[in-house]
Amino acid sequence: MTVSFEKLAFQCSDRRIAKTAKSALVKRYGNVSVEEADAIIALGGDGFMLETLTRNMRLIRKGLPVYGMNRGTVGFLMNGFDKDDLPARLAAADPAIIHPLKMTATHGSDTVNELAFNEVSLFRQTRQAAHIKITIDGRERMPKLIADGVLVATPAGSTAYNLSAHGPVLPLGSDILALTPISAFRPRRWRGALVKADAKVVFDVLNPEKRPVSATADNIEYRDITRVAVEQDIETSLTLLFDPDHALDEKILREQFAT
C-alpha cells in the first residue's frame, strides 16, 4: 500500500536554525502527533537524529519511518533541507533499515541495557590506560588490549567516531561490524578487526579498581563498568528515509574516497 505522507510530525533540535525551519514547515504542511503521523521529520544534526530515534522508539519499531533534514553540522544521517514538495520527496525516498547494537554493561552489582545506532565505546576514566580482554562468540581473541579504549561500530555509524579513531568505513548492508581500538599502546600494530554482524563481542575490564573504564552507547554513559557485551539487536528494525541522490550507502561510499 502506498503511503500518502499527508500527516507529518515535525521535531527539531534547540538550534535557532532548526526551530525556524520547523516553524516554516509546520505553517506549510501542518503538524500532528507522532501517534497520528505517516512519518517523523527530524530537523537538526546527527546527534538530534539519534535523540529522535531513541525518544520515539516504540512507534518507530512498529514501522513509523523517520526522514531527517540537516539543520545541524555534520548531517551524515540527514537529507538536504528544502521546504518544497516534502510529501513527494518522502514518497520517492529510499528506505534504509537500521539494526542498532544492544549494549549490556555491568557495573558493581547492576546490569544495564542500552541501544546504540552508531557505536558502543569503552574509555579509560583516569590518566592510566585501560586494560581490556576481548572475547568474540565465546572465544578469547585478545587477552589484554592496552589502550585509551575500544569501540564497536555499525555500518551506519562507521563514519562517525569510528572513522576518527582510524576505523574502516563499512558499506550499509555489509553485515559486518567494526571493532576499533582507541589509541592502542599494546599490541602496538593492532588496528582493529571486522566481525560478523551477528557476533557477540564481550569486553572484560582488567583491574577495574586501578584502571576504571566507562561505557557509552551513543550518548548514554555508564562509569566504573567491569564487563560489556555487545551484539546486534535483530529484533529492532528502524526505517530511515533518504532522497535517492543522498542515500546512506552512497554517502558511505563517498566517504571512503574523501581526501
Image (cartoon, helix red, strand yellow):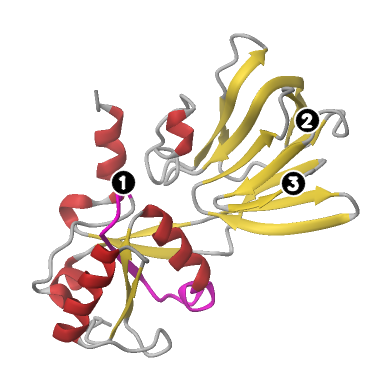
Label 2 sits on residue: 139
Question: Where residue 177 sits in the image (x, y, percent)?
Answer: 53, 38
- 192 above or below 244? above
What is the secondary structure assignment of the residue under circle 3? loop
C-beta proximity under 8 Å, tags 2 and 3 = no
Question: Where residue 39 sits in the image (x, y, percent)?
Answer: 32, 77
Q: Is 99 a magenta residue?
A: no
Residue type marked 2: Arg
Which residue range is magenta in the image?
56-76
Task: Identify which residue is drawn at 84% across, 28% down.
Answer: 206
- 207 above or below 95? above
Counting residues from the N terminus, which is met first, the one under dot 3 or under dot 1? Answer: 1
Residue type marked 1: Val
Label 1 sits on residue: 74
Residue 157, quarter of picture: top left
In screen coordinates, is 133 left or right of 191? right
Q: Which numbered marker is on residue 223?
A: 3
For the residue pair 212 and 258, the one nearer the viewer reads as 212
Query: The C terminus is located in which quarter?
Result: top left
Task: Identify which residue is drawn at 72% across, 19% down.
Answer: 146
What is the secondary structure assignment of the residue under circle 2? strand
Residue lying furthest right: 109
Question: Where residue 25 sits in the image (x, y, percent)?
Answer: 19, 78
In screen coordinates, is 107 left or right of 196? right
Task: Identify which residue is drawn at 25% across, 27% down.
Answer: 258
Query: The N terminus is located in which quarter?
Result: bottom left
Task: Identify which residue is drawn at 55% across, 64% down.
Answer: 236
Question: Where residue 158 sits in the image (x, y, percent)?
Answer: 44, 38
Residue lying furthest front: 16
Q: Residues within 10 Å of mark 3 (few under 14, many from 20)?
A: some
